[in-house]
Amino acid sequence: MAVGVAAAPGSSGVVGVALEAVPGGAGLSGIPEEAVLRREAPGTDTDAPPKKRARQQEGEAGKLEERLYSVLCCTVCLDLPKASVYQCTNGHLMCAGCFIHLLADSRLKEEQATCPNCRCEISKSLCCRNLAVEKAVSELPSDCPYCVKQFPRSSLERHQGEECQDRVTQCKYVRIGCPWQGPYHELPAHEAECCHPGKTGQELMGILSEMDQQHRRELGLYSSIFNLLCFEKIGFTEVQFRPYRTDDFITRLYYETPRFTVLNQTWVLKARVNDSERNPNLSCKRTLSFQLILKSKLSAALECHFLLLKGPYDDVKIKPVIQHHVFSNDSNETEYVPLPISDSVECNKLLAAKNINLRLFIFQIQK
C-alpha cells in the first residue's frame, strides 16, 4: 500500500513518502515491523522505472561531488588538499604546501603574508588546521591512475601501493640488471620468462661490484662520523638562525645566529638564500648556504671538522655533510657551503618558520 503526502500550502516543493508493506501486511494501521520506509530525493520521478530512478540518483550524487570539490579545494592551487588543510581567520582554505609557500615568499619579499582570497594576514599563529575539511576530503572519491576505478582518497594510496592489479611494478631481478617495468598482473608471466636469472657468474660479479661501490659510499659518511666521535675535543650546541636584511639599496634576506661558545671559542653562523640571488622569490628552486665564522683571537691555528644537523624540535630533512677548515687570525671564515637539505620544499619549510633551529657539531683535530 502507498500513501502520498503533499507539502503544506506556501512551502517550496513536494515531499514524496512511500510506505511499502511486506506482503501479507494488514494495512496502514497494522504495518508490520519489517515495513520499509523509502524517502525519494527531491526531483526524483517516483513513477519512473527503477533503472531510470537509479540513473537520476547517480547524476545527483555526481553533481554533489563536483560541488564539494569546488568548495573544499585550496584557494591557491585550486586542487583538493592531499594532507593538512589550513584556514585563514575568514575561513578560506589552503593546502599545507601552498600555505608554507606563501609564508616563505613573504619572508623573501619582506612583506606580511596575506590570504589570496580576502587579503587578511596569515601566519602560523593566526591560521589553524581545519580537521573537518581534512576528514571530508579524505572520504571524497578519487580515480586510481592505473585501473581508473574510484576509491576514497583515504584508501587510494594503499590501493595504488598494494592492491591495484594494474600498478606499475618492476621485475624482482632488477638488482641484477633486468629493466622490465609493467602492470602488476603481468609480473608472474614476465618473471617466468626473464633471462636474467640465467646470467653467468662473471656477469653477476660485475653487477655485484657496482652495488658494493655504492654501498661503500653510503657507509663512508657514517664511518667518518664514528671516527670523529673518537676525537678528544668535541663540542656541540643548538643554534638559532634569525632573519635580517642587508643595508643595500635593494635589500637581501640573510640569516645570522647570536654569538655562541664551543670549545672555548666564540663563533657565529651566517646563512643566505640562493647565494644572495637578487630575486629568490621568483625562483622555483630554493637553496640555503651557510658559513662558520670564528670571532675569537687565536694564538695558534685551529683545525676543525664541523657539520649541521636538524634540531630536536624540527622536522626538516638534512643529510649530514662533514666540512673541514683550518681557522687562523687571517682565515677566520669558511666559504659558504650548501646546507644539505633534500629539496626546495624543505627549504620553504625553513623560510616559513620564524627562526631556523639547527644543531652544530665541531670536532677539533689535535696535532
Image: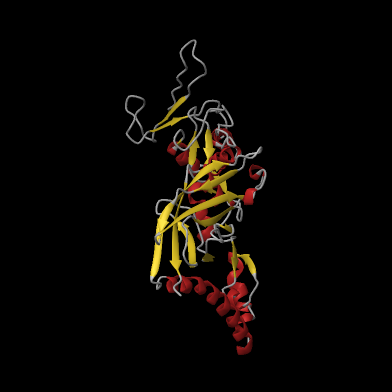
Count of marks overlaid on the render: 0
Q: Position of residue 197 (x, y in %)?
A: 60, 82
Q: Residue placed at 66% from the left, 38% from the top?
A: 250
Residue 90: tell me if it is visible. yes
Front residue of this view, candidates 106 and 147 = 106
Q: Position of residue 23 (x, y in %)?
A: 39, 35
Give the quarter of the figure containing the N terminus.
top left
Front residue of this view, candidates 246 and 7 = 246
The image shows residue 310, relative to residue 85, as above or below, that is below
Q: Position of residue 171 (x, y in %)?
A: 59, 72
Asked which quadrant contains residue 102, the reply is: top right
Front residue of this view, candidates 246 and 103 = 246
Asked which quadrant contains residue 279, the reply is: top right
Asked which quadrant contains residue 33, the reply is: top left
The image shows residue 357, relative to residue 233, as above or below, that is above
Residue 52: tell me if it is visible. no
Residue furthest to the bottom in view is 201
Q: Position of residue 283 (x, y in %)?
A: 66, 46
The image shows residue 187, relative to residue 109, as above or below, that is below
The image shows residue 173, relative to residue 309, as above or below, that is below
Residue furthest to the top in view is 10
Q: Residue placed at 63% from the left, 80% from the top?
A: 196
Q: How is the image coloured?
A: secondary structure
Front residue of this view, candidates 30 and 285 = 285
Q: Residue placed at 50% from the left, 41% from the top?
A: 137
